[in-house]
Image: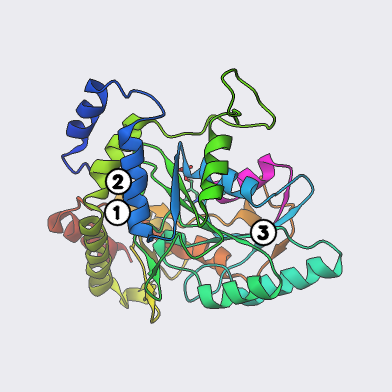
Amino acid sequence: MAFQIYVSPPHPSGKELTYLTEAVNQNWIAPAGPHLSRFETLVETYAGSAYYATALQSGTAALHLGLHLLGLSQGDTVLCQSLTFVASVNPLVYMGATPVFIDSEPETWNMCPDLLEQAIKEQLAKGKKPKAIIAVHVYGMPYQAAEIHSIAKKYDIPILEDAAEALGSSYQGKPCGTLGDFGVFSFNGNKIITTGGGGVLITKAMKSKQEALKLATQAKEATPYFEHKQLGYNYRMSNLNAAVGCAQFEVLPQYIAKRRSIFNYYRTALEGIKGISFLPEPTGFFSNRWLSVMKTNSTSQRERIRKKLAAAYIESRPVWKPMHLQPLYQHQKAFTNGTSAECFEKGLCLPSGSQLSEQQLDLIIKIIRENA
Ligand SMILES: *Cc1c(COP(=O)(O)O)cnc(C)c1O
């Protein structure tokens, strides 16, 4: 169905064509070039001087290479947040590893530290030490990093941080994407800024970046002929996509401010109406509010609102269906407490794009109020 208002459409800054024209005129129409370096520098400046960015074709590719750098291999187990987009999990399955899903806690909707520790203990008792933890900042809200990271440290298990939705979010002042052993951003069209499809892998060591670059470009050896010792991929971001990314990065602070103001507008107008609620930010947490997510009273209330919005050509979407409930993954082991299932049953993602006008917000709020 064609909507007039989408949940999270791309928002051009106005500079995209300028940079694209530069790239084309310079004939850098390739997965290499000056805009690619500039884009990576912009991400590195954002992340802080201690980090390296590798620009890739998608967040999914970045997760895949992150798992490679962690040494994941066939038969390994990875502990993964259940309330997420399927791309958090698929790459580990590409590699022949097995996911074990961890439910959420109600404060941030992200990985529950207690269930994480329970899962680790159970896996250790079976003699299968998990190879990695994939923790997600769902909808831009940081996960309980102090607790999750102290458990990871206690059992010496690395964290691959899926910050695909959390560019611009931070935890105790530290940017999301730099909290884990490796971090991932997505620049897909629906994210807070976009390259028209793309991702970045954040690493702490230059050596890891070099390894990621090699894997992303078919694992070519440094010989004049094509020599390959490893199995590589064709994952490097194109300079054209990076040119778009440069234009988008310039407006990131404004877009974050706008998304946060949209969230506050909804929250002020709707909170408390027939059991409707929104997730506040715990102290020390800063969310980019990539999506404004509303919790309703019941699935029927949620569906009534969603359908009325759709009838007015306004898109809204139920919260991610947890991985442990997906037909693809429901046979996998999961440590659950009902939180993510409840978010899926009652949660609704509202239009959150940084181009929304106050008039559009008022219309959306009116429809929700009338149908709550
Ligand atoms: C968007 C997203 C990804 C994947 O990013 P792509 O760039 O679309 O491959 C991974 N994880 C989460 C949580 C996402 O929202």
Mark 2–mark 1 distance (CA, rounded to whole Å): 6 Å
| Residue type beneath disc 2 | Tyr
| Residue type beneath disc 1 | Pro
Number of labelled discs?
3
Q: Quadrant of the C terminus?
A: bottom left
Please report the residue visible at 21 percent of the width from the left and 36 percent of the height from the top.
16
Disc number at residue 132? 3
Position of 268 relative to 224 (above/below): below
The stretch in magenta equals: 87-99
Mark yes or no: residue 190 visible. no
Mark 1 falls on what kind of element? Answer: loop
- Which of these two is toward me, 74 or 327? 74
User: Where does the image place residue 128, in percent across and percent down from the top left?
Assistant: 82, 61
**Residue corresponding to mark 1:** 351
Q: Left or right: 218 with respect to 200?
A: right
Is the residue marked by circle 3 packed among few (<14), some (14-19), or many (20+) residues within 10 Å?
many
| Residue type beneath disc 3 | Ala
Mark 2 falls on what kind of element? Answer: loop
